[in-house]
Amino acid sequence: MLVTVIGRGHSGTRAISQTLSESKIYMGEPLNKSWDLIPPQDMYEACRVFARYVKYLGNMKWDFSKVLTMDPDPDFIKLIESYLFSVLSSNSEKKGWKIPETTLVYPWIQKMFPDAYYIHWVRDPRDCILSGHMTDDLNDFGIEYDKSDDVRKNRAISWYYQRELVRSTPAAKRQINIRFEDMVFEQNKTIERLEQFLNIPIAKIPMRTDSVGRYLTDNEIHMYDFFKNDMLECGYKF
């Protein structure tokens, strides 16, 4: 069984990676304090290879047709296999990995691992964009967009881009959608869903309620009109 997490940075993916690890799923090594598989450089470079085939149309619209129809670039495959060496070479029957940048290359990850279990993880974008992450500036990964001097807006566009990419990708054979907030406030129900999905016992880790709704004390802009459709789809009120 191979498991991975599809979710933007600062979506609380640490919680699901730790949960999987404590449920005796080998998550690769070494792991950092966010429970990401490191070193990440090969994954970062794989993201840049992927981005060569994404065309920016302007006005926050991207053409993903090439990446959705072609086979993964051979250079991409080599980089991913290198990044995942500890996972792919493991004899463990239950294994996986987590790093937010996986979301940036989701269509090709799904093509490489069609039988994997995909945990789609989302968090209220108003909380998600409060602090910086490696993926804030899409240009760093070769992705074109209308970059501005507003760091918070660039971060919000990155969140939106990743939602668009995932939405454009056909559903995986094995896929579950989970909200970070449900792991916090309805952990037992969420664990039950995960157990049914993965067919294994799932560990319960401590979750902090103060990690939800942090935007309420934020004095900067944290809501953008282009969030609205996704927020409605995910069940967030605004």
Image: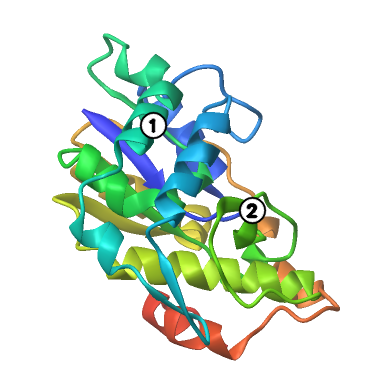
Q: Which residue is mark 1?
A: 80
| Quadrant of the snapshot with the N terminus | top left
The residue indicated by pointer 2 is 140
Q: How far apart are labels 2 and 1 at the CA level?
A: 18 Å
- Image x and y of residue 208, in percent: 64, 50
Res 127 label: none
Q: Quadrant of residue 46?
A: top left
What residue do we see at 50% from left, 17% from top? 29
Q: Is residue 143 left or right of residue 212?
A: left
Q: Is residue 47 above or below residue 181?
A: above
Q: Indicate the position of residue 102 as horizontal and vertical percent values.
A: 44, 45
Residue lying furthest right: 219
Q: Secondary structure at mark 2?
A: helix
Q: Position of residue 2 (x, y in %)?
A: 26, 30
Q: Rate crowding at label 2 as few (under 14), some (14 to 19) or many (20 or more) other CA atoms within 10 Å.
A: few
Q: Is residue 26 visible?
A: no
- Residue at 37% across, 34% down: 75
Where residue 153 sits, quadrant-wise, is bottom right
The residue that appears at 15% across and 39% down in the rendered structure is 115
Question: Left of 144 or right of it: where is 117?
Answer: left
Q: Is residue 124 above or below residue 59?
A: above
What kind of residue is marked 2? Asp
Q: Do we see residue 155 in this rendering? A: yes
Question: Where does residue 49 sit, x and y in percent of width and height?
Answer: 44, 46
Q: Earlier in the sequence, mark 2 or mark 1?
A: 1
Question: Between residues 166 and 201, which one lies in front from this camera angle?
Answer: 166
Q: Residues within 10 Å of mark 1 (few under 14, many from 20)?
A: many
Would residue 48 be found to the left or right of residue 222 on screen? left
What is the residue that sits farthest to the top in this orientation?
91
Q: Nearer the viewer, residue 191 or 86?
A: 86
